[in-house]
Structures are given as C-alpha cells and as structure tokens.
Amino acid sequence: MAALYANDVMSRDANRHCEYQVSKAVFRHSSLNNFTRTSTPLQQPSPISPQVITEHDTEDDSYSPVNMHHMNLFHFLTTETLPSLHTHELIDISPTDILKHCLPVPYLMNEFLGFAALHKSIVGGEAHMRESYRFQAMNFQTHALSIYNAEPAVLNAETCIAAFLFSSVLGAHLLCDTLIYRGDDTLNKFLERFVQYIHIHRGIRTVVGGHWDDLSQSPIGRSFVISRAVLGDQPATFGPTLTKLLGLIQSAKLGESLTKSYKLAIGNLQSIMNVCEVSTSTSISTPASVSAYGAVIAWPVMVPIEYVDALGMRRPEALVILAYYAALLHLYQQLWMFGDGGRFLIESICDSLGVEWGDWLEWPMKILHDDNNSLELISDS
C-alpha cells in the first residue's frame, strides 16, 4: 500500500519510544467507542480468535461449523475492498500477496476484516444492515488492537511487513470512520476524534519507523521509497494559493515556533497538491506508485505534532489549514473512504470562524462551490 505511506515525521528514537508508549496507553485505556455512536450492542459474531492453535485445537476446529459472517466479510474484502484500493492506486501488490501476510497474523487479519466491514457499512445497499456492519468493523478493529498490544514490539525483516500493513490499514480505517460517521455532526466532536486518530496512527507508525530499510527490500515496501521521497521533503516553492495562505499566517505575528509549525503543515499540503496536480496531467511523468488518493490520506501523519496540538486547541489558523486539506478531500470524494467529509469540514469551519476569516478561506470555498468538482482547480492553485 505504498501510496498510503507518508514520511515518519518523528525521526528521533526517543520520540519514537515516547509516542509509542503513549499510544499503547491510549489503546489500552481510551475507548475506541469514541469512533462510533453510542448504541446498544448488536448480537454479532466475535472476531477471529487470537489464541495459539494447538494440534488438539486444530482437530476440533476441523469439525466446527463455518462462520458465515466471517466468510461473507472475507469475500467482500477480496472482491470489493481490495480491488477498490487497486482502482485508486492505494495498493500496488495483488490481493493474494496481501492475504499471504494476513493469514498468519491474527491482528492483521482482524483489521482487514474490520476494514471490509466498514467499507460494506458505507456502500452496502441494505440500509438496515449498515449499523450492524459498522459495529462489526469496530469490534474487529478493537480486537486487532488488543492482540497487537499484547504482542512484544520486536520487529525484524519479516514481521515488520505485517506491522507496516497494519499501520496503513488502521490509519485508513480510523480516518474513514472519522470522516463518514460524525455522530452529532458538530465540529468540536469531529476535531476531538480527528486528533485522537492522528495520535493513534502516528503511534503505530513509530514502531515500524526503524525498519524502512527492511521494508524497502520487500515488494510491499519498494514503491514506498518513491512515495516517501516525493512526500517527505518540504517543497522548494509554493503555488499562489498556499503562498497567499502562508503570507496571512506570517502577517498574523503568531510567534516563531507556531509560525514554523504552520509553515511545515502548509508545506506538506503543497507536496500533496503537487502529486495531485501531476496525477491529473497527461504531460507530466510521475512514478505510478505515487497516488493522489494515497497522498491525501497521508497528510494527517505528515504534519508536525505542534500543528496537531494547535488543532486540538481549536486555534483558528490551524482550522483554516485543515479547511485546505478538506478541500482536497472534497475533490477526491469519489473514494468511498472520504465521502462528504470534506464538504462537512469546510462548511463547519467557515461557520465556526465567521465572515471575518473569509479571505483566509477563499480557496476552500471556491472548491466547495465549483459545480464541476474539477481537479484542474489544483493546477490553478
């Protein structure tokens, strides 16, 4: 899933260890139910069991009835979810190769089935079943995290691939659930979940952060090297849209540290917009592994942690930058993971900040009001 992979912004080993430990605590002590609406639990089949299978267990299992709910999701994963990721260039290896890594690793298989359940809750035709599938998605994901946290964080050239896939799929899962299922549709609630999602995703990614060399030697990781090079560095120049935004930030006299973190977050946006512009042009050559959809997904884990903190404090400038990101979500809303999340964010941020921030929010509003939803607007920016 090379296009999903952003540069790991936490480069120091100490920071990696610290954020990983914090994230482990988040997994254990904070409820992932924050990512779902509070509801009466439905009677659902339990996720795949994490227990070690003994010879005796294997014999017993051979006589156990097939869990048709799991088979249904597995079929949907292989025929719908994974092909949809291929269509949008979010993965560049075959579903067969992905399954080879999933089947021996319970936490990864649980997460992939949870991701398929989330997908089915969004695109499935039976409205009365969507909440049921979403509950299953949450159940599988929670189980995957519990297995992952119970295992020693010792990675090698072989096991880091599963952890890498887990990081990518978990991040996409949490981002999608945050964008699509917004609960009471308030901006504050969304921001609370969005910031939590970023911390969880970054925490998981730090674990594989020291194994990029191993990953680059695998079929899954080779194209990641290209994506990392394209997305990881700050751009040399900014387009007119983000040049204007950066000028407004600098004119606001916010202090050196905060201004620097905003500039880095805007630079990350420019890198993604550059990829998006290239993907819409037939005259510019680019590595096929750099997907516009994957670049958009990557932004939340590319930004500096100081920006995430500012977003958590609801600083207006941080909200403006988020609105620019939301404009990209809106432009690529045909991906089922994004839906109408971009529109919701732009409208909510504009309503929250008021007309006095209209000049700052000019481009996101322009994107929102473009009836053709034209990707060419990125080239004009």
Image: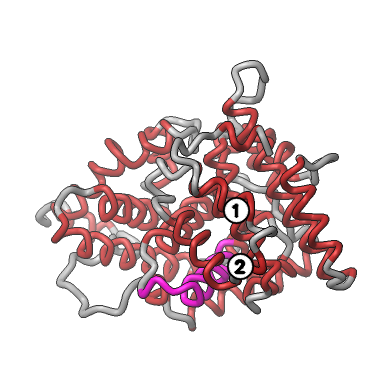
Nearest to viewer (mark 1 / mark 2): 2
Eyeballing the image, is 357 above or below 380? Answer: below
Residue found 76% across the figure and 42% down from its top? 240
Residue appearing at x 61%, y 67% in the figure: 355
Residue 121, placed above or below residue 3: below
Secondary structure of residue under mark 1:
helix
Query: Which of the numbered marks, if any, corresponds to residue 355?
Result: 2
Q: Is residue 192 visible?
A: yes
Q: Amino acid at mark 2?
A: Val
Structural distance between the alpha carbons of marks 1 and 2: 20 Å
Residue furthest front in the image: 355
Q: Position of residue 155 (x, y in %)?
A: 61, 55
Q: Residue at x 31, y 59 (%)?
A: 53
Looking at the picture, how far across and down is residue 46, in whole percent?
23, 66
The local secondary structure at tag 2 comes to helix
Q: Is residue 269 magenta?
A: no
Q: Residue furthest bottom?
A: 29
Residue behind mark 1: 325
The quadrant where residue 281 appears? top right
Visible residue check, residue 222: no
Q: Which residues are magenta?
A: 184-201
x, y percent for residue 174: 46, 61
Q: Is 199 within the magenta? A: yes
Amino acid under label 1? Answer: Tyr
Q: Main secondary structure of the magenta part?
A: helix
Q: Quadrant of residue 198?
A: bottom right
